[in-house]
Amino acid sequence: MNRRQFLSATTATALLPASLALAQGQGAGRTLTVGVRSGPESIDPHWSTLGGHIEALRHVYDSLVAQDENLVLKPGLATSWRAVDDTTWEFKLREGVTFHDGSPFTAEDVKFSLERIPQVTGPMSMTLYTKRAKSAEVVDPLTIRFVTDGPAPTLPNDFTRLMIVPRKIGAAPRNEEFNSGAAAIGTGPFRFVRWEPRGDLVMERYDGWWALKEGAAQPWARVIRREIPNDAARIAALKSGQVDMINYVPATDVASLQRDPTMDVVVGDSVYVFNVYFTLAEKLPRPAKVDGREITDNPFRDIRVRQAMDLAIDRRALARVVFEGLAKPMSQLMPDSFFGASPNLPERRPDLPRARALLAEAGYPRGFEIDFHSTTNRLPGDSALCEALAQQWSRIGVKANPNAVTGTVFFPASTRGEYSLQMSGWGTLTGEAAYTYGALIHGPDPSVGLGNFNRSGYSNPEVNKLLLDGSRTLDDAKRREMFARAAEISMNERPMLPIVMPQTVWAMGKNKLLFTPRVDQETLAQLVAPKGA
Amino acid sequence: MTGFLLGRLAQAVLVMLVMSVLVFLGVYAIGNPIDVLIDPAATQAMRAAIIRQYGLDLPLWQQYGHFLGNILHGDFGNSFVFRIPVLSLILSRLPATLELTVLALLIAAVLGVPLGIWAGYRPEARSSRAIMAFSTLGFSVPTFWIGLLLILFFSVELRWLPSGGRGPVGPLGLSIWTPEGWSYLLLPALNLSLFKLGLLVRLVRAGTEEVMGSEHVRFARAQGLPESQVVGLHVLKNIGIPIVTVFGLEFGSTLAFAVVTETVFNWPGMGKLVIESITSLDRPVMVAYLILVVLLFVVINLFVELTYGFLDPRVRAR
């Protein structure tokens, strides 16, 4: 099937000498091969919210709203948007956009894409980003309105993940039709050629991409994204010249690649932060021990204990030792530049005498013993960080037993509330506070759909109100203020401790490619250029 | 003969049933697959809806009942992660693993049997000692480490062979039709064969040493037969049965679990698929895969037993 698809695609190109000549004029023949850690799970852009899935399919499809490299919103298939009233958003669409089959892009396609998501999405449900839009109304071919369930100020942020497929494919196609290429029609810079699960994703240049008309350069005739999950194998593929660049270079290999005269290394910030979560429930699922005997009290309910454990952490040392300098100390759950981050949360520096004093005041002069769980191989450095934290806490007498377990064990157990003290990474993928603080800090409340990843059980009525009101305030300035306030209160109460943000590293042949890293870690071929071209 | 085959078939079905129950219980003991599959930012309502959609809210025995019912209709279900039929997902990886395994076993057999016979025939020779030392390395040094060394030497330094992946695929889904395909195949096959090579050398040597001292070899020599015929016919036939047994078992386990080599060389085979399915708790793929593995072992064992009869007339008579 794939082979036939491929053959028919190549013959189709051969039969179109005009388009071929055009491609050659713009530097045809250039192929970019990228070794990536993970790839898509399907060619249907609405199947999954997984980072690697979205990233891969951004080559074939465009989202309604785009983001720059720091996740600030910018026009995508929509050129502008505004809130008409509390529950209605209006989006103006770009003129002159065509799908890969040549048909024009209109508001009907947007409506169709939005409505098909609940029918076709998988367990990584894309409805996460579309659930606020109750209905879509086509005003004219280039204007569409969305009615939301209450004020939805972050709808444009959510729609950075709303990718558009043409209405003419109809309701039937599922993953198989997309994977075969029959339904894989987008408006993006590349046409889909072939893919197989966990294998290569091959794409070729689409000369009708709208951004080309606006002066964007897109030098690649062909792009191959080769999925190589094993770190050592990915680096070997780069060094042996099988791929032009790779993503997610592990911190331990960065130094040797930097010394290599044939390699360039690019380092960028990420949206991920490692957080330690205290369980604040009356009784701990795995009780703390003092002098080897289990105690009934939960020491974490005393803010002085949480402060003491925070003061025992030397974040700069962790960044230096565990991440070889490729991490930044954090004092809130997302980077300072994101919408709703607080400017009033300075870097947290260690103070061991004060930590010991606080612990003694709280009634634990000799410390206590506790099980500490984290993921392993989920994010780079997670298990090493878990062990390093345990060592730092031991300096104030808190004996944390580090337990790094695979995600398959960690996440189900964490959901069941079996951990007393845990650490995992969280990425603020939308680039604004509602996504992160709503899920992690708001008290668990299914009725408003907030606190859905609140592992500590923290619930502060004042913070809850700020977060709920904030999620319903359309005025940007006011909303920013509310989230910053919620961040300050909650971070100072320390139900969870942000530790460090690991940076992301890419590597490529020396002086071969120009590449600006994005904080969402996406490696997009349309943003890579050959050097000296 | 028919009775024998039917007995084997019944045995296979039983083992497959036990296997599927074990996988169900195993995944259940780890936890709800949804907690791994779902977006962590999903709301409580979404989570509940997805659990219902995948039938994971049902008691385990009901989930298993559904699964069995579907299998009776020839439907192994869809992958949680890819939502494509697991059978086609697994079978699409079969050619890749098959060619890798067969080539690895061929390398092991073509090199291992003569080397082993030589080492058993002339146990005191310097060359035999070298062969034995090499065979010890073959199965004591970890596969992934040798794999990395092979890549470092042949791909990164010399740039003779690609460091990983698979070449262009031709008829039957195999990549052995072009020189480029072979360039991808060579290193992983060599890597995979080393352990088997070491094992085979030791096995053949031990057998040869034993048979060389036996009476029928002495008689053959006394008869004035040339040494080549003594070793090539009379010795080889007598050490055949243990070799075929181990060969069959190794073929099965390599086909099923070439995981390490496939990971290091990024070879798109079944082992890589199943290890990735385990890390994402993709239960339908895990269950179907292990059931197929059981089937595979049963079939291979059957062939091994049929080969016994061919090698040893006494077995045929029974």
Image (spheres, coloured by chain):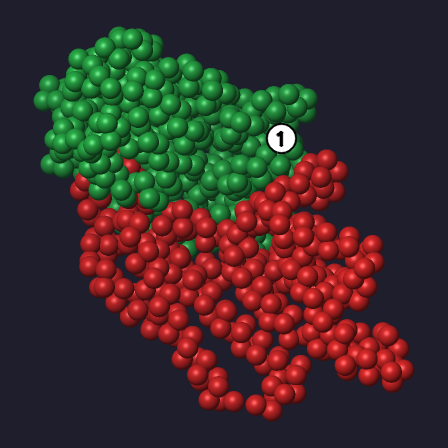
Q: Is residue B245 left or right of residue B226?
A: left
State the residue lying farthest toward the bottom.
B317
Residue at 54%, 72% (x, y): give it.
B300
A250 or A363: which is nearer to us? A363
Tell me, what hue is chain A? green
A91 or A119: which is nearer to us? A119
Residue at 47%, 59% (x, y): give it.
B90
Q: Which chain is red?
A: B
Q: Secondary structure at mark 1?
A: loop
B106 or B205: which is nearer to us? B205
Quarter occupied by the C terminus of chain A:
top right
Residue A272 spot, x, y in % from top left: 37, 26
Whether residue A486 is visible: no
Q: Is residue A170 left or right of residue A366?
A: right
- Residue B287 image-quadrant placement: bottom left
Residue B213 spot, x, y in % from top left: 76, 74
Whether residue B248 is visible: yes
**Residue that label 1 marks:** A26
Q: The numbered mark 1 sits on a residue in which chain?
A: A
Residue at 37%, 74% (x, y): give it.
B14
Q: Is residue A277 left or right of residue B15?
A: left
Residue A27 spot, x, y in % from top left: 64, 31
Three-letter code for the amino acid on which mark 1 is drawn: Gln
Q: Is residue A518 left or right of residue A289?
A: right
- Picture layout, residue B248 above or below residue A247: below
- Picture layout, residue B77 above or below residue A20: below
- Picture layout, residue B292 above or below residue B220: above
- Residue B242 image-quadrant placement: bottom right
Residue A78 spot, x, y in % from top left: 34, 29
Residue at 22%, 64% (x, y): give it.
B62
A132 or A312: which is nearer to us? A312
Decide: few, some or many residues near mark 1? Use Cα within 10 Å; few <14, some 14-19, many ≥20. Answer: some
